[in-house]
Image (spheres, grey):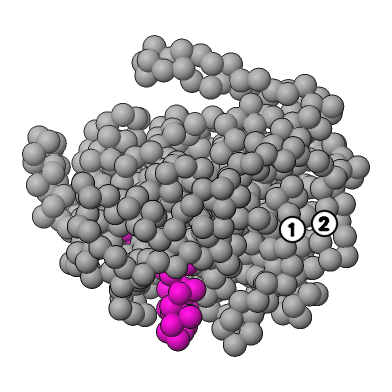
């Protein structure tokens, strides 16, 4: 049986994705943004992602038995008195110009259930409390789930007006960023002091929380705009909203957003992050109390807030914690498929998913053909890991393109920019390469066995989902990957999950004595992580990067 999981639609959607299961085996997963080169793939169906998944297995669309959708579109569109049924949906998902006419079964899975499924079923836990925290689902913004004998039971849900995701988005917009640049708010928060209080509008309750806001009710698909507008009114009472300057860049020939921050706005960012930490930690306690489970799983876009996740670890709020690496909406294609498999009696599938390297890969032969066609000088290297380690030990900043592309928003060592973490200037140089603000933090990848040398918390983080407190004794040894608040968003690297990347760091350790490198995603400003060799080559030649290693081929500048 072939089950296709999908996320994405032609309006009010983001993070389109597709995955394919053959019975209990995950064949492929990919985000549409990586293939069409449009970040977040707004308002798109995952046509290219579907085709990639089918090609990976060597089947056509006619062999799909069932499509699992990470939204209940029938329920959503009923609110605006528009009919979206199976036939209407399939016509858009498989347009005649791209696909053969087919008629598989379609299951519309509640959005938060799909998120919850993606978290719990991939955690490996027998039982857990599950938290879903995002902008909104069909009619909720936060939900708590219990698990028993593999089933997910909804325990409690919170209305859209109480959206923690929209609260954070509104704060991001208030600071002058695009609302989807919440990672910048998270990074900026460490530069301020949390001096603003929201106790008059945010209440923590014994069984949850409450936002004292009253957004306008509009007959629309979602309430994002009305909820954000309410928060902007509240924020504007505290201090003036930061308006970005739009400067015309003579090189890109486009307007670029430029924001300068006062101390007050840095303090505002710190206050927003502190409040978010408080809300999420409180919800973890509530979920444990309501379910009686000590293991916790989290999904939904807010689950990518690694500062809050780190606080859960630091405060030791639960026995074990699993953050779904695909916490954003891309993950509901996976969650919807897993939920359908569970309903068919095919159980324990998610627990088999141990790594998130599931996207396109390219053979040495394909890479060589591309390089020759483009007339690029290259050399074959027998040991890419050793050569890469030697280059970064010499102070070079390199692109690293290997194996299957990682899924999710964090670079996990297959589509990465790598540098030496021991010199502070490499942080600025890497941010310049990526055309990012110099204050933005960069992340360390650490050999799993060496993690205790660098961080205080005793936990692994293979998917870069937690912030850790860096030990005082090593702060000066790795300044390029330590944020201003002495924390870092760490990836722990396991030999079995990523042998070539593990080998690169191990070779670097032989040369430098440090089992740690600076790792950031191989992309430039406002573009998705590199997917193809062509994407990687553009990043190399459009920046101050020194070299690129693709497969076994080294390209120097």
**Which picture quadrant has residue 105?**
bottom left
Instruction: Kindly identify which numbered label has been placed on residue 209.
Output: 2
Which range of residues does the magenta coloring cover?
336-359
Looking at the picture, tell me which residue is in the foreground, 551 or 294: 294
Point out residue 424 in the picture as x, y percentages from the top left corner: 54, 38
Q: Are marks 1 and 2 in contact (CB under 8 Å)?
A: yes
Does residue 342 show up magenta in the picture? yes
Q: Position of residue 457 (x, y in %)?
A: 67, 65
Residue visible at 23% across and 70% down in the picture? 63
Residue 44 forms part of the magenta stretch: no
Q: Is residue 357 above or below residue 374?
A: below
Quadrant assignment for the C terminus: top left
Report how far apart the C-alphas of labels 1 and 2 lie in the structure: 8 Å
- Residue at the (67%, 56%) spot, across then down: 140
Residue at position x 56%, y 83% in the image: 150
Q: Is residue 139 visible?
A: yes
Tell me the residue at 84%/27% (across/down): 237
Q: Nearer the viewer, mark 1 or mark 2?
A: 1
Pointer 1 or 2: first along the chain: 1
Residue 158: give its label: 1
* Residue 326 visible here: no
Q: Is residue 143 left or right of residue 55?
A: right
Residue 383 at what x, y percent from top left?
A: 23, 59
Quadrant of the image occupied by residue 189: top right
């Amino acid at each position: 049986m072939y089950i296709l999981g999908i996320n994405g639609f032609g309006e009010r959607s983001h993070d389109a994705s597709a995955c394919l299961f053959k019975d209990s085996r995950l064949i492929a997963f990919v985000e549409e943004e990586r293939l069409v080169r449009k970040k977040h793939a707004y308002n798109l169906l995952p046509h290219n992602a579907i085709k990639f998944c089918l090609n990976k297995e060597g089947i056509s669309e006619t062999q799909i038995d069932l499509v699992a959708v990470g939204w209940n579109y029938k329920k959503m569109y009923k609110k605006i008195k528009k009919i979206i049924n199976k036939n209407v949906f399939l016509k858009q998902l498989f347009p005649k110009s791209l696909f053969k006419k087919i008629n598989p079964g379609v299951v519309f899975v509640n959005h938060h259930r799909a998120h919850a499924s993606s978290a719990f079923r991939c955690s490996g836990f027998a039982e857990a409390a599950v938290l879903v925290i995002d902008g909104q689902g069909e009619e909720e913004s936060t939900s708590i789930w219990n698990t028993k004998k593999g089933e997910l039971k909804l325990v409690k849900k919170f209305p859209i007006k109480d959206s923690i995701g929209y609260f954070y988005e509104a704060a991001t917009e208030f600071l002058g960023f695009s609302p989807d640049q919440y990672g910048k708010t998270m990074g900026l928060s460490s530069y301020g002091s949390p001096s603003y209080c929201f106790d008059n509008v945010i209440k923590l309750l014994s069984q949850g929380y409450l936002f004292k806001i009253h957004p306008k009710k509009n007959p629309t698909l979602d309430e994002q705009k009305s909820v954000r507008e309410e928060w902007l009114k509240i924020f504007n009472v505290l201090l003036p909203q930061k308006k970005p300057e739009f400067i015309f860049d003579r090189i890109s020939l486009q307007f670029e957003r430029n924001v300068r921050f006062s101390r007050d706005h840095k303090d505002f960012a710190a206050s927003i992050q502190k409040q978010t930490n408080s809300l999420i930690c409180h919800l973890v306690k509530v979920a444990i109390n309501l379910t009686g489970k000590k293991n916790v799983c989290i999904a939904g876009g807010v689950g990518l807030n690694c500062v809050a996740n780190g606080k859960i670890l630091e405060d030791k709020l639960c026995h074990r914690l699993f953050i779904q690496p695909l916490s954003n909406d891309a993950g509901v294609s996976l969650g919807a498929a897993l939920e359908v498999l569970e309903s068919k009696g095919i159980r324990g599938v998610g627990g088999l998913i141990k790594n998130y390297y599931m996207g396109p890969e390219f053979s040495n032969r394909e890479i060589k053909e591309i390089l020759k066609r483009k007339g690029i000088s290259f050399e074959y290297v027998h040991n890419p890991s050793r050569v890469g380690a030697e280059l970064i030990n010499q102070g070079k900043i390199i692109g690293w393109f290997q194996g299957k592309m990682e899924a999710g928003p964090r670079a996990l060592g297959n589509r990465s920019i790598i540098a030496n973490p021991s010199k502070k200037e490499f942080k600025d140089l890497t941010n310049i390469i990526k055309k990012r603000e110099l204050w933005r933090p960069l992340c360390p990848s650490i050999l799993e066995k060496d993690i205790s040398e660098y961080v205080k918390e005793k936990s692994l983080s293979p998917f870069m989902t937690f912030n850790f407190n860096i030990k005082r004794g090593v702060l000066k040894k790795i300044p390029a990957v330590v944020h201003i608040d002495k924390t870092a968003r760490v990836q722990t690297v396991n030999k079995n999950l990523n042998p070539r990347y593990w080998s690169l760091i191990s070779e670097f350790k032989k040369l430098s004595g440090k089992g740690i490198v600076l790792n950031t995603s191989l992309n430039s400003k406002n573009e998705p992580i590199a997917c193809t060799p062509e994407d990687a080559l553009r990043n190399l030649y459009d920046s101050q990067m020194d070299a690129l290693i693709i497969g076994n081929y080294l390209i120097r500048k």
